[in-house]
Amino acid sequence: MKKYKVAIIGGGPAGMMAAIASGEELKESGKVVLIEKNEFLGKKLLLTGGGRCNITNLSPIKKILNKFQNKEKNFLKHSFYTLDNKSLLKIFEEKGLEFKQEENGRCFPITDDANSVLKVLKEYLDDLNIDIILNNPVNSISKNKENNNIYGKNNEYFTIKTNNEIINAEKIILATGGMSYPHTGSTGDGYKIAKKFEHSTSPLTPGAIPLKVEDNLLKQLSGITLENIAISYKFKKLANLKKVTSNGNVLITHFGLSGPGILDISNHISKDNQTKFPHNFDKKEIFLEDTYINLDLIPDLSENDLNKKIIADSENHGKLMIKNYLKNYLKNRFIDFFLNRLEVSGNKTLSNMTKKDKNRIMNNLKDFQIKIKSLPVQTAMITCGGIKIDEINPKTMESKLAKVCGLYFAGELLEPHGPTGGYNLQIAFSTGYLAGKSATK
């Protein structure tokens, strides 16, 4: 039976970083083990950022923390400052991997390949002589005591039973991920283990999901990207919330809508319909009733300023047809669809445009409504909710529950989640790093 100082369960970004941090602290081989149920490490990491790996966001840490609700912000603060975005990149840069910044602070490896990030993590694990057990799901974990006659006290340790191994460890770090992308091994194992140790979870809902729409004419515009759009959603069921807005590009697809702005707003739609989700997210699709989102197609221009501009342009360019005038605001392929929805003729000139036409155009440029048909659950990229942070010490990632001293948590398993743009991988790496450092103390 093997004995370790620290055992990490889950070989994703949080688990690998936890193993690296523990190994660096202990500086001795045979003290840290990383247990992964898949046949190789980082299976889900390879899917992040469309396979490019949006590893972090390069905004200042204060700005990054402001992307989270106050409770989550306060919980993440210590881990984010322990391993901030610049320190994270330095870990990879020391192995020769360079990075680039894209829109809104999104950071990607210069290779545009998640494999290059995984390669560096594996190099560190190899350098530190971390024991790695692959293709070996954990079946059970128990906590035991043994009497140590030399020191005259009881030593506590965990026993981990897998398909092929029985392992003892003084400390355990759970980094098993949530329930998104279940084919990568994220099937909620960590929640079950935590529950056995009397930890509880907040409601679990799928997040970062493309949206299916009712409108077949809209779907025919597949491939169009509406840039820098403001998307809003009015809550129906969450009594303490009224309306939420996200900003970002919107991609029209063959089934509906995707892109960063849509993925972020989907988190809120999902939470508003949380009673429809089974615990294991096993439904392929959740159908919605009377669910709409509203697009502000020109968020940089207020409604009042837009009204003044249309009036002035009508006076100065009266012979210009409406469909040509709208090229100032919309993509060409979107204009016919837009005017058809408004029942306004694009062949009219601005001088012949009625007040009703003008109001319809103005109102819909600022508040274009789209009915949402369903949430394709199995395309979810993150899990919203998780192990309640009230039960975890934010300065160590260790359980606060007295019965499970020595149990740590990291990554998507935790309650906090962020928007798209590198925030969720930063959570994984920072909490993993903090848990790994703390577990060696």
Image (cartoon, rainbow, N blue to C red):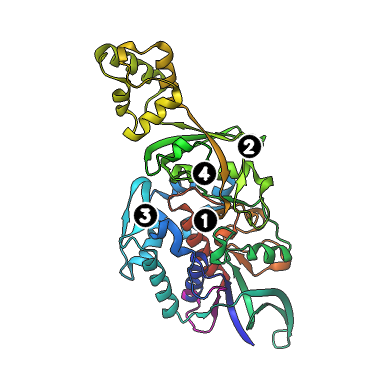
Upstream in sequence: badge 4 or badge 3: 3
- Work out whether residue 289 can be spotted: yes
Q: Nearer the viewer, mark 1 or mark 2?
A: 2
Image location (x, y in percent) of residue 15: 52, 68
Q: Amino acid at mark 4?
A: Leu
Circles 4 and 1: CB atoms closer than 8 Å: no
Query: Which circle's residue, 3 or 2, is located before the other in the chain?
Result: 3
- Report helix, strand or loop for mark 3: strand
The crowding category of the residue bearing disc 4, from other C-alpha atoms within 10 Å (few below 14, some 14 to 19, many at least 20), is many
In 3D space, how far apart are the residues under numbered discs 4 and 1 (Cα atoms)?
35 Å
**Numbered range of the magenta stretch:** 24-38
Q: Which residue is mark 4?
A: 211
Q: Distance from label 1 to label 2 (Cα)?
A: 41 Å
- Image quarter hosting the N terminus: bottom right
Residue drawn at point x = 38 percent, y = 51 percent: 106
Mark 3 neighbour class, 10 Å CA radius: few under 14, some 14 to 19, many 20 or more: many
The answer to which of marks 4 and 1 sits earlier in the sequence is 1
Q: Secondary structure at mark 2?
A: loop
Q: Amino acid at mark 3?
A: Cys
Residue 161 among those drawn in magenta: no
For badge 1, the amino acid type reads His
Residue under numbered circle 1: 78
Up the image or down, 3 lies above or below 306; here it is: below
Is 201 drawn above or below residue 305 in the view shown? below
Q: Quadrant of residue 291?
A: top right
State which mark lies toward you, 3 or 2. Answer: 2
